[in-house]
Image: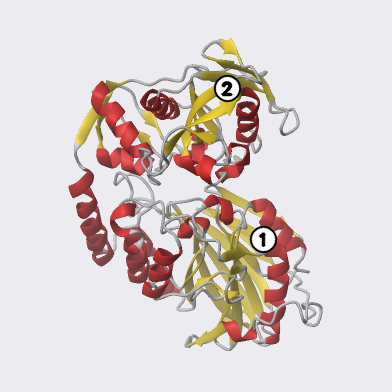
Amino acid sequence: MLNFSFSSRVWQQFLSGVLVGLLALGSASTSVSGWAEQPATIQGRPFIHITLLQLNDVYQLAPATPAEAGGFARIATLRKRIAAENPNTLLILAGDTLSPAPGGKLFYGKQMVDLWNQVGLDLAALGNHEFDYGNDILLKRLQESKFPWLGANVIDKTTGKPFGTVLPSVIKEINGVKVGFFGLLTPDTQNASSAGPNVAFNDPTYTACATVSALRRQGAEIIVAVTHLTMDEDKRVAQNMNQSLALIMGGHEHSFLQSVAAGIPIYKVGSDARTLGRYDLWIDAETHRLNSMDVSMIPVDTSIPNDPTVEASVNAYLTQIEAGLGETIGQSTVPLNALQADNRSRETNLGNLLADAYRAHLKTDVALLNGGSIRSNKVYPAGPITRKDVANILQFAGPVLKVEVSGKVLKQALENGVSRLGEEAGRFPQVSGLQFSYDPQKPVQSRVVSVKINGLPLQDGKPYTLAVPGYLVLKGGDDYSMLKGLKILNDPQEAPSDSEIVQTAIQQAKTVAPKVEGRIQVVGKPNKI
């Protein structure tokens, strides 16, 4: 377990009048009380002890195997244990859970809300994937939630108010201390999900300043931001807060990340509940100022027993999913690499298998898919492949389109794919029918050194046919805006889904053995083949 501590920090009082007039959010915040623990005494001085627990980007209901980390049933056990130690405990989700989760098109996120209700989630920030099934489905999930959803910058354009029942902020009063929480969602959600045109995602930094000002006016003494932003966006928020935040609990990136910006700690705790972030806040009982904070990262591994009630609910959902997806469709003689970090940073054998299937099915010159469309974040061992495996890998089940693209635009797409190296960005490309090399030391948009199409040099003016996820063409998702407006050669309404294509390919092949072939080369570095 990793442990950190921020002790004896000097927290400057935020000037409540600085942002008066930016946003009047007072009426949209709620206050909750009910804790009764007496202040703890440390070296003769009374302190109020509050524990915050963090998860973010949780899609899996249970570990793929008992030996792996994660699972709702273990989280339920941990939450009860920690709450027994300190009744002043809150479990918080920093966005992304309704999609892409197993059983997506069977339950549309209903199973996730049900399990969070059972675990005892106290509040959640909206993530971009909350909008994957559209606004109407999200509104239903919000109504079913026994916990508030936060999103200060998520606005319904038709009313100018927060979207649906989403709250910009909430104040929880604990032993007389008013702790304020507010949520922020990355504006890229407009292009990275299926939010309707009536939803606006306002600037997070501007919104944060206005929301903090409103919380101060309502009496909040400690303020925590629960965000689903990139780390760069989180840092910009922190740098404009004048140290008025105790903590930023973030999501969106799926790796454990930590930083401090302008004196404000920022944490992201990975994905799929493999690690539980714990923050123990020690607040002076007299002044209600934060004196210190202890931070620990708890592995959610086999040492944590399953809560039997939650485990039964998880198993019931998995049984329903298995009933429709348990059929074996083929065999793989090699392990299939669905690890997120690999598919968003380099060529993988699974990326090649998928791209080859898209290209063969649509009979195109080349294929390209964003590494972020490859989910489940695990290595599938050699052996049987089931429909469930494919559904877990391709959880979005989006259409694959055949488009006409010039060599120049195709190269622009590849440049976009390698524009955010080192961030595990979903835009990293997996390809078929082409080989390209890039230099990570060169400036963004000039990193691609060479491109060959079926062994021949790319020609800027030549048209090529491309198989590509509809998400990249129809929405310009993952910043593939250069693909929007391309001539589509098949009917998007009748286009096969990615999972359908791959299932068919595996069934026809019966046995697959994809390998890394050097399709993506890094200049100056050896390529493992």
Residues 176 and 162: in front is: 162
- Describe residue 304's horizontal placement relative to residue 266 as left or right: left
Q: Which mark is residue 416?
A: none
Q: Residue at 38% of width from left, 34% of height from top?
A: 379
Q: Nearer the viewer, residue 187 or 309?
A: 187
Q: Quadrant of residue 81?
A: bottom left
Mark 2: which amino acid? Pro
> How are the colours assigned in the image?
secondary structure
Residue found at x 61% / y 53% = 188
**Looking at this rendering, what residue extends furthest in the top direction?**
455
If you read the primary sequence from the N terminus, does the residue marked by circle 2 or circle 1 appear first? 1
Viewer-proximal residue, 275 or 21? 21
The answer for how far apart the CA atoms under marks 2 and 1 are is 50 Å
Label 2 crowding class (10 Å Cα cut-off): few <14, some 14-19, many 20+? some
- Of the two numbered discs 2 and 1 in the rendering, the one whose residue sits closer to the viewer: 2
The residue carrying pointer 1 sits among few (fewer than 14), some (14 to 19) or many (20 or more) residues within 10 Å by Cα, namely some
Q: Residue at x 66, y 87 (%)?
A: 218
The residue under label 2 is 463
Q: Secondary structure at mark 1?
A: strand
- Whole-percent x, y for residue 519 in the image: 52, 19
x 39%, y 75%: residue: 143
> Tags 2 and 1 in contact by the CB under 8 Å rule?
no
Q: Position of residue 288 (x, y in %)?
A: 66, 83
* For residue 333, side relative to residue 354 (left or right): left
Q: Position of residue 194 (x, y in %)?
A: 49, 55
Side of 53 relative to 293 (left or right): left
In the picture shown, does residue 456 fall above or below 259? above
Residue type pointed to by label 1: Pro
User: Is residue 154 something that shows in the picture?
Assistant: yes
Residue identified by numbered label 1: 265
Badge 2 element: strand
